[in-house]
Image (cartoon, rainbow, N blue to C red):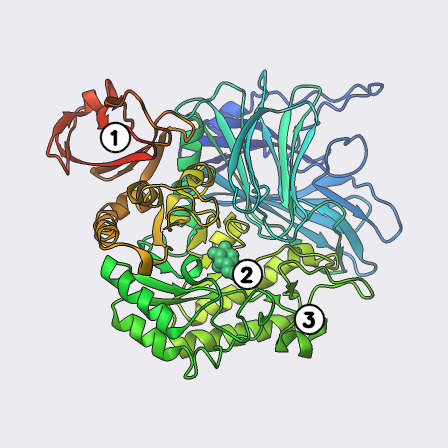
Amino acid sequence: MTAVELSGDGSTVAIHTVATTYALRLDAEAGSVRPVHWGARIGVDALLAVPALPSPHPDTFEAPWEAAEDYPVQGGRAFGPASLGCWFPDGTTGLELRIVSHHATADQFTVSLADRHQPLAVDLHYRPAPGTDVIERWAVVRHTGDTGAILLHRHDSGAWCVPPRDDYRMSHVTGAWSAEGRLHRTPLPTAETHLTSRRGVTGHHANPWVMIDDGTAEEQHGEVWSMALATSGSWRLVASRSHSGRCAVAGGAGHDGVRHELRPGESLTTPLFAGLYTTGGFGAASRAWHTYQRRHVLPHPGELRPVLYNSWEATTFDVTAEGQLALAKLAADLGVEMFVVDDGWFGARTSDRAGLGDWVANPHRFPNGLRPLADEIRGLGMGFGLWVEPEMTNPDSDLYRSHPEWVHHTPGHQRTELRNQLVLDFGRPDVREWAARWLDQLVRDTAAGFLKWDFNRPITEAADPAWTQHAAGVYEVIDRLRATHPDLRIESCAGGGGRIDLGILCRTDQCWTSDNTDAVDRLEIQHGHTQVYTAATMVAWVTDSPNPLTGREVPLRFRFHVAMTGVLGIGGDLTTWSPDELTAAREMVTVYRDIRPVVQHGELHRLRPPHSAMSALQYVHENRIAVFCFRVDADFAPGLRSLPLTALDPEAVYRDEDTGATYPASLLLGPGLPVTLPGGAHASTLVRLHRVAD
Ligand code: DGJ
C-alpha cells in the first residue's frame, strides 16, 4: 500500500501512516473536502462504503457539516469558524469553492479549489511523515487575478476533524513566565474554545498544540487525536464542538483581526499543522510526537546534546573575563562540555536598561574582545557559547539612536517598553540584513559553537503582517546563519519557554524550558513540555539552593536527577559550591553522560505524574533503561516501594547496572521494580537497567 491511495472513482483518498489512516471524501460539485475516517489503517476501497454526510434540509437552521469540513470557508451556511475568510476588492466576503483538481503521488496528496466568482484559489496539501503516525498539512492561498488586493482576515492551515464520539475532552498547556507547561485535561464544551497568542511569539501562556480524547483515555491506553502547529508568531487554535456532536480543531497563524493583503499573482503558504492518531493513550501520543521530531523536525537528531554550563544565575549582568574563567575552570572539572556566557558581555549592557543592539564586546570588560576568553574556554576542553537577543534593542543603545524607525511601532503612538526594550521589526529586509551580518561576524570572530537566542518581551504596536511575518524574518536569519556555520548549534529561549514550537524546532537544537530552575516546580514544567516535545530539546540546569527565584532548598541529588531527565546543564555559582558538592556534581555528570543516549534518544514513558506520592519516568533505548523516581514530600513510613515498568520484552532479564541485581521482565512489568527512597523530603533515585538475556 502506498502512503496515498486514491479510489478508482476519484471520490475518496486515504492517507496512510505507519499504523493509521486519514481519509477524505471529495465532492467536486459541492466544493467540499470532508473527512470520512481518522483511525486504524484501512484501505481506500473499504472506505467507499462510508456514507457521505447528509445534505442539509433546505428549511433547517442546521448545518450538518459543522466541525466536519477539512477546510471550512466563510460564506453560505458555514456557521463555524472559517479556515479561510476574506474581503474581496468589491467589498463582498463569501466564498463558493469548487474542486478544480487533485493530485496524488506516492507520498503526498494535493487538492486544489477555486472560488466560482472571485480570483481566489486554495491548494490543500497532505503529507504523511515517513516512519511516523503524523500527517503534515498546509494550505497555499493564491490570488489568481490581475487587479485588486484581497484582504485575508483568516488563513488557517486547516481543520482536523475528530471522528464522532459520545464525549470529547481536550488536553493543552497554559502558563506564565517561570510557570510554563501547566497541563490541563478538561471536558470540551459545546462551544468554540480558542487557544491563541496575540503576542507575535508562541508565548508562555499557551502552546500551539492540543490532544482530544473521548474522556476515557489514560496515559497508557485509549484513543487520542493530537494536533500541533509549526509557527512562532501569533497563532490561533479553535477546538469546536458542535450541537450535532462533532469536534474539529482548526489552526493557523495570526490572531483574530490580523489581516494579510494578497495582491494579484501572490500566494500565501500557511505553516504546517501536523496531526496524529493513536490508540495508546497520552503517553503514546507524546512518543509519536517525539519520534516525529527526531525524524522530521530537529536539524541534528542523531547528535547528543552537550552538558552545558550557563553563567546567568551565577553572574547575571556582572560579566567579566576573570569571573567567567573562574566558573569555566570549575565547570570543566565537572565534565561540562559547552560553556555559555549569558547576557552582559556586550555594549553598555551592565543592566537590563542599556546596550541591547550594540553587539560588540564591552570594551571595559573585554578590552581585547571575546576571542581570548573563548580560546581559554576551548583550551579547558569545552565548547564556547554566547547569549544573544538579536530581535531587541534598548532605547538607550547606539543602535536605537541611529535607527529608531527599525522597531515595531505605530506612528504617533507610545512605544510600549517591556524590560526596558523594544522589538526590532524583522519583517524589514534592512533589519534582517543587519542581524545576519553581525551574527555571522560574531560567530566568526569568537569561533562560537553555540548561541542561546533569547527574546524577552512580546511584540506590541506592530503593523498587521508583523504578527506572523516577524517570525518568518527570524527564521530567515537563523537559516542563513546555520547555512554559513553548519557546526553552530542554537538554543531557542524567550524569557524561558516562550518560544517552543515545531516551527522554531526545525532550525534550533534545543530550548530553554523555563527561567524557573527550582527542581520541584520543574517537574511540573517538564511534564508539560514532554507532552509534545522530546526530552532531547528540554534543557534543564542544576542551580543553587536555596533557589534564587523561589527560595526553596532542595538537595543537590534531587536537583541533578530532575535536570538529568532532559538535556543536563549547570547554572549555579560553582565558586560557592563546597568540595563535597563539586565531587557529587562530578559524579552525577559522569552518570548523566553514561545514560544520556537513553534519555535523549530513547522512548519516554511517564509512569507516574509529578503530583503523585512518588512520580516516575522511564526511558527506554535499545537494550538500556533509565528510571527516575521523585518524592517531593517527606514520607513518614519510608521503605521499599515497587514501581511497575512498561514496554519491556516480557521474556527478557534485566540487570541493575549499579547494584548488579537481576530481574526478569515479568517481575518488572508485574509486581514492579523495587525502589528505595530515603525518608526526608525531596528524595530521588535513578535506576539504570541493562537487558542481559532472554
Ligand atoms: C531570559 C533567559 O530566559 C535567561 O536565562 C537569561 O538568559 C536572561 N533572559 C538574560 O537576560
Query: Can you name the residue that lies furthest to the right here?
Result: 90
Instruction: Name the secondary structure under disc 2.
Output: helix
Q: How far apart are marks 2 and 1 (CA)?
A: 48 Å
Label 1 crowding class (10 Å Cα cut-off): few <14, some 14-19, many 20+?
A: some
Give the residue type that dot 3 points to.
Trp
For residue 694, say whether it is visible. Answer: no
On the image, the x and y values in percent for residue 186 come to 57, 25
Sequence-first tag of 2 and 3: 3
Ligand 1: does it lie within 8 Å of the C-beta at label 1?
Answer: no
Q: Which residue lies under the disc numbered 2?
A: 475
Query: Total of numbered circles in the picture?
Result: 3
> The C terminus is located in which quarter?
top left
Sequence-first tag of 2 and 1: 2
Q: In this view, does 151 lie above or below 682?
A: below
Q: Which residue lies under the disc numbered 1?
A: 678
On the image, the x and y values in percent for residue 111 come to 62, 43
Instruction: Name the secondary structure under disc 1.
Output: loop
Give the residue type that dot 2 points to.
Tyr
Label 2 crowding class (10 Å Cα cut-off): few <14, some 14-19, many 20+?
A: some
Residue 406 shows which numbered tag? 3
Along the line of sight, which residue is nearer the eye, 579 or 493?
579
Ligand 1: does it lie within 8 Å of the C-beta at label 2?
Answer: no
Give the residue type that dot 1 points to.
Pro
Q: Distance between the residues labelled 2 and 3?
A: 18 Å
